[in-house]
Image (cartoon, rainbow, N blue to C red):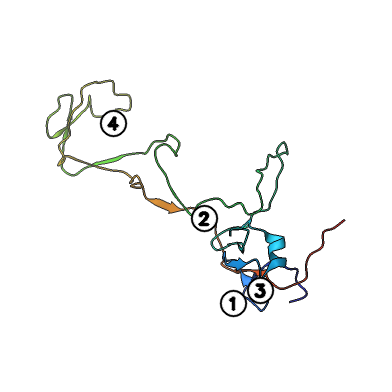
Amino acid sequence: MSSPYLAEIRILPYMFAPRDWADCSGTVMLVQQNSALFALLGNHYGGNGQTNFALPDLRARVPLHVGGQSGQKPPLSYHQLGQAGGTTTVTLTEQTIPSHSHGVTAANTIPVKLTDTATDTTYLSNWSGGVAYLPNFSGTTAVPLNEETIGVSGGQNGAALAHENRQPFLALRFCICVDGMFPMRAN
């Protein structure tokens, strides 16, 4: 690779980190043996900052540009160097999803009569040869339905299980230069 800067991060398609490079996997390094690298990274990515420091850990992470300014249009979030966030899975609860409704499909499995008097084998209705469904029913009496008369099906509610929360991805190797030219600040 052509003269990389110390602490430069590159995305590589290899199954290994090349010579003078290390995986961005949070490896803890000794300050005494890597003082120039520590001068650039500090302990932004972990370590105690006295005797050791950590390399950035980009395993299962998406890099995000540092900075951002409030008052900018559109407003951007400010992110500090080394700040991590997000989660790979999310569990939706009643408190985290908007109010919504689900349709219900009803199907009877045996012949029934429609009447305005409820029995174990009837739908409660004011039917006179028309539609058996009353969309604006104003009755207040709850009528238990015989389970042999009607079957109701609907979707499941998720059972409080987590779902994956990642954008489409392509796995590549993030490597950091551990032996390269020390970068100089621009004027």
How far apart marks 3 and 2 lie (CA) works out to 28 Å
Query: How dense is the environment of label 2, judged by Cα within 10 Å: few (below 14), some, or many (20 and up)?
Result: some
The disc placed on residue 77 is none
Q: Where's residue 70, x and y in %?
A: 70, 38
Q: Amino acid at mark 4?
A: Tyr
Lower sequence index among marks 1 and 3: 1
Lower sequence index among marks 4 and 3: 3
Q: Where's residue 49, x and y in %?
A: 63, 58
Q: Where's residue 127, x and y in %?
A: 23, 27
* Residue at the spot of label 2: 166
Query: Residue farthest to the bottom?
Result: 19
Q: Residue at x 55, y 63 (%)?
A: 59
Lower sequence index among marks 2 and 4: 4
Eye-nearest disc, 2 or 4: 2
Residue 38 sits in which quadrant?
bottom right
Residue 55, relative to residue 85: is it above or below?
Answer: below
How far apart marks 1 and 2 lie (CA) works out to 25 Å
* Residue at the spot of label 1: 16
Q: Amino acid at mark 3?
A: Trp
How far apart marks 4 and 1 lie (CA) works out to 66 Å
Eye-nearest disc, 4 or 3: 3
The disc placed on residue 21 is 3
Q: Which type of secondary structure does the marked residue at label 4 adopt? A: loop
Q: Which type of secondary structure does the marked residue at label 2 adopt? A: loop
Residue 44, relative to residue 131: is it above or below?
Answer: below
* Residue at the spot of label 4: 133
Lower sequence index among marks 4 and 1: 1
How far apart marks 2 and 4 lie (CA) works out to 43 Å
